[in-house]
Image: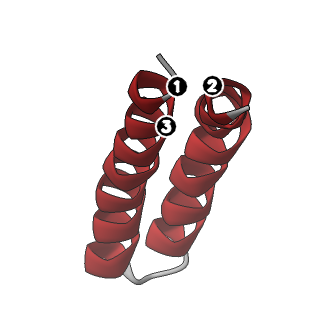
Amino acid sequence: MDFFIGILLIIFVAPMVGIIGRWIENAGREGLGKTLSVGGYLLVLGIAGWLIIRSF
């Protein structure tokens, strides 16, 4: 089950975090948008990777 949650995080949540960060960046909050976009994306990928590896 963890494997599928990790895959769903990679497919749906990681791009959504990037899009939201880009939206905030374009709304005038450049530093916050970049931090959320890059940091959030890496955080989601890290959690997804951990779930996938843990499933084996």
State yes or no: discs 1 and 2 in contact (Cβ < 8 Å): yes
Query: In x, y percent, where is residue 2?
Result: 64, 35
Q: Nearer the viewer, residue 5 or 29?
A: 5
Between marks 3 and 1, how big is the CA–CA gap?
A: 6 Å
Q: Residue at x 63, y 25 (%)?
A: 3
Question: What residue appears at the point 73 percent right and 37 percent down from the top-left corner?
Answer: 12
Q: Are marks 3 and 2 in contact (CB under 8 Å)?
A: yes
Q: Secondary structure at mark 2?
A: helix
Q: Amino acid at mark 1?
A: Ser
Q: Upstream in the sequence, badge 3 or badge 2?
A: 2
Q: Looking at the picture, does residue 41 appear above or below residue 6?
A: below
Give the mark toward the camera: 1 or 2. 1
10 displayed left or right of 56: right
Name the residue tied to disc 3. Answer: 51
Residue 23: percent from left, percent from top = 59, 64
- Residue 37 drawn above or below residue 50: below
Residue farthest along the front direction in this orientation: 56
Which type of secondary structure does the marked residue at label 1 adopt?
loop
- Residue type at mark 2? Phe
Q: CA distance from mark 1 to mark 2?
A: 6 Å
Asked if marks 3 and 1 touch (Cβ < 8 Å), the reply is: yes
Q: Which residue is mark 2?
A: 3
Label 3 secondary element: helix
Return the residue at label 1. 55
**Image quadrant in which the N terminus is located:** top right
For marks 3 and 2, give the CA distance. 6 Å
Q: Quadrant of residue 37?
A: bottom left
User: Please, which residue is most extreme toward the top here?
Assistant: 56
- Residue 12 located left or right of residue 2: right
- Residue at 47 percent of width and 16 percent of height: 56
- Label 2 Cα crowd, 10 Å radius (few <14 / some 14-19 / many 20+): some
Q: Amino acid at mark 3?
A: Leu
